[in-house]
Amino acid sequence: MSIRLVRAALVSAATWAVVATAALAVPSTIALAAPPALPLARSVPGGVALLTLPGDSATAPRAWFGEAPVLIVRRRQHWLAVVGIPLAQSPGPAELRVRSEAAATGTSDTRLSFTIRPWRYREQHLQVAPAQVDLSAADLERVAREQALIHAALTTYSAAPRATAQLRSPVAGVRSSSFGLHRFFNGAARDPHSGMDIAAAAGTPVHAAAAGTVLETGSYFFNGNTVLIDHGGGLITMYCHLQTIGVARGAQLAAGDPLGTVGATGRVTGAHLHFGVALNRAFVDPALFQRRAAGASPP
């Protein structure tokens, strides 16, 4: 995954507001008779906080973490905020802004406090050629254009189409690099890994992790051939370094539909899939959406 793209993806919510003011309109919700399947709770940088919202109104509240709208789901008799926490977020006290509406009292804004715990991710030290990290002016200009497209896609907040926030594994393979890995190139610290790498042979089919709409496809300097899918409520998945892309922007996909094949495009050393998961514009650990992990707790 790219050094510069990861850094751009983890900027503050205030910066995100500049590139997508329109996306901060009324957030949508999942309102279901049965409790939805949820990601695992781990309130750490790069994790997910599950916060029960006050009150039991039949009307869904709205919530924002910083300036980013947050996924709201119905959980038994209460509303639940599913909050993605950026890797760059400092541990300590944090707040969710909640807006509720009631016929008797009208609209009211409250602040819901929660705590982000420290979390230590693994480190990796690599010796690489300077050309792999120092870009030409032309390359930097290309990367800037591509980042703008990806930023716009990640600000999408649409109606959630599914009764689950859990994700399938997009490809059959072995995890070769985990989310949050802190890399050092030639002794210098670089941005942490913003997704999960899954090693597989070139040409292996890649599938949509959940139902959704294809937001963007393209060939990018760092990420190679890439597909981004909107799953609703600010949940977006990203599939990078593809050999082939088999879908077009706007395509409606069911969970498990093929979208391309594993490749080694972009800045990589071998064939693999980089699988990224963004929630309220923050890349978070994909493993929390796939299986129960040690230390995680349901709401």
Image: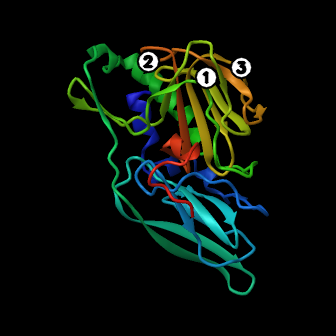
Residue matched to label 1: 218
Viewer-closest of 186 and 217: 186
For disc 3, the neighbor class at 10 Å (few under 14, some 14 to 19, many from 20) is: some
If you read the primary sequence from the N terminus, does the residue marked by circle 1 or circle 3 appear first? 1
Q: Position of residue 96 (x, y in %)?
A: 50, 66
Residue matched to label 2: 267
For disc 1, the neighbor class at 10 Å (few under 14, some 14 to 19, many from 20) is: some
Mark 1, mark 3: which one is toward the viewer?
A: 3
State which quadrant residue 246 falls in.
Answer: top right
Marking on residue 17? none
Q: Which residue is drawn at 69% across and 39% down?
A: 210
Q: Where is residue 289 in the image (x, y as percent from the top left)?
A: 58, 45
Q: Which residue is drawn at 72% across and 29% down?
A: 249
Mark 2, mark 1: which one is toward the viewer?
A: 2
User: From what the image shows, is residue 127 above or below residue 280?
Assistant: above
Tell me the quarter of the image containing the C terminus: bottom right
Q: Is mark 1 on a helix, strand or loop?
A: strand
Residue reaching furthest to the left? 187
Model colouring: rainbow
Q: Where is residue 65 in the image (x, y as percent from the top left)?
A: 51, 60
Q: In whole angstroms, how far apart are the C-alphas of marks 1 and 3?
A: 11 Å
Residue matched to label 3: 246
Q: Is mark 3 on a helix, strand or loop?
A: loop
Q: Is mark 2 on a helix, strand or loop?
A: loop
Q: Are marks 1 and 3 in contact (CB under 8 Å)?
A: no
